[in-house]
Amino acid sequence: MNGIEIKRVKTPSERRLFLTFPWQVYRADPLWVPPLLPEKNKVIDPEKGLFFDRGEAGFFLAYKDGKLAGTICAAEDPPTNKTRGKQECIFGFLEYIEDYDVFQALINQAEKWGQKRGLNELYGPWNLDYEDSYGVLVEGRDCPPAMMCGHSPPYYQVFMERYGFQPARAQNVAFRIRVEDTPEFRRLVRLAARIKSQSKIVIREANFARWQDEIDNVHRLLMIALAHLNDHIGWRRDSLEATLEPFRAIADPSFILFADVDGETVGFLPGLPNLNELFIDVNGLRYPWDMLKLLWLSKTRNPKSLTLKSILVLPEYWNTGVIVLLLEAMFNRAVAHGYKWVDMSITSTDNPTSVLTAEKMGAEIYKRWQVYSLPIL
């Protein structure tokens, strides 16, 4: 097709080409935060990647006129498909130059891969992970993304929709809240004071000495608190543990908050320094000296933003003040530590609890992403 050749990734050197190709796409984009290559290499390695304990994936390189021009991963996740009653071929690591023929060839390859396995729909982009940097950015190219949020050029959305992809679910959004004395914050403090005087809700910090117990708490909340969302993808506990483990070393337990009622954990709100403010300048740890730069930056630069990745509350406690007390405790800590703003990402626009909570805090949406689907014919 128009001088385009698709090759399957088979060797370690080809795997490195696959992972480093985005540097070609984003070399002139000052907002792009390079992915950390050591972590991404584990994700796509069949011997190390957690996804391969349950599924299969193929990785492909697109060459145009002999030059590398794009990448894609096609994958099957049988347990998730069974749970959701679907036969989806998930795709991800979709990166390509601004050339529709290259994009078309990559999608055709994913379709063929899925057809061969009896799958009937493309679904993505997901990078073998249902939480990290998924979807296509459709709004918000005035600032870099926060941790675990994706970034893509404008033509990605154009090409997806030109090919016939349709939104597979509600858009995902990121909210931004300034850490300052606002009417919304003062109202939050007053409301929290009333709730504290009338309820049994206890806000506590994470106990890292009981790490496995805390993961059990988060997993239970994830499976119950988000079950009402359309197109909800449940979490496997091993996937959750693998996702949380890298943050264990950087997280401050005083920012990992739980809400308990009569000894039962009913809410969760984790806050992390937005390390993308450092990662944007360390080249994805592509070379050994990049690690030295990261170590230097970690000692000399404090992130200005705090990122909140999830607000989980059991449905029976949605209107009891749990969310209010979690947010009040978090924002008090943010003020005390000198953060300038808070990122709340990523939530779905069909999640009424998160959206309403953010709006009451005076938050503004500053980024949107879209996940797409396409029947495989």
Image (spheres, helix red, strand yellow):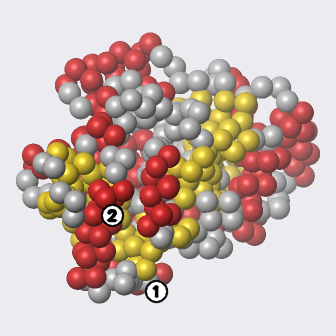
Instruction: Give the structural element (helix, strand or loop) at label 2.
Output: helix
Q: Which mark is residue 85?
A: 1
Residue 265 in view here = no
Residue nearest the viewer, comparing 39 with 144:
144
Q: Residue at the location (37% across, 80% down)? A: 376
Q: Residue at the location (65% across, 20% down)? A: 338
Q: Position of residue 222 (x, y in %)?
A: 56, 64
Q: Looking at the rendering, which quadrant does residue 185 occupy?
A: top right
Residue nearest the viewer, comparing 240 with 5:
5
Q: Which mark is residue 104?
A: 2
- Mark 2 or 1, closer to the camera: 2
Give the mark, 2 or 1, whose residue is nearer the N terminus. 1
Q: Looking at the rendering, which quadrant does residue 90 occupy?
A: bottom left
Is 185 left or right of 69, judged from the image as shown? right
Q: Looking at the rendering, which quadrant does residue 284 occupy?
A: top left
Tell me: residue 190, above or below residue 6: above
Instruction: Give the structural element (helix, strand or loop) at label 1.
Output: loop
Is 229 left or right of 215, judged from the image as shown? right
Q: Residues within 10 Å of mark 2 (few under 14, many from 20)?
A: some
Q: Residues within 10 Å of mark 1 (few under 14, many from 20)?
A: few
Q: Which residue type does callout 1 highlight?
A: Gly
Residue 122 in view here = yes
The CA span between labels 2 and 1 is 28 Å
Q: Position of residue 375 (x, y in %)?
A: 43, 80
Q: Which residue type does callout 2 highlight?
A: Gln
Residue nearest the viewer, comparing 155 with 229:
155
Check the image and name the residue furthest to the front. Answer: 2
Q: Residue at the location (45% across, 52% down)? A: 156
Q: Residue at the location (42% across, 60% down)? A: 125
Q: Position of residue 189 (x, y in %)?
A: 85, 37
Q: Quadrant where the C terminus lies?
A: bottom left
Tell me: residue 125, above or below residue 36: below
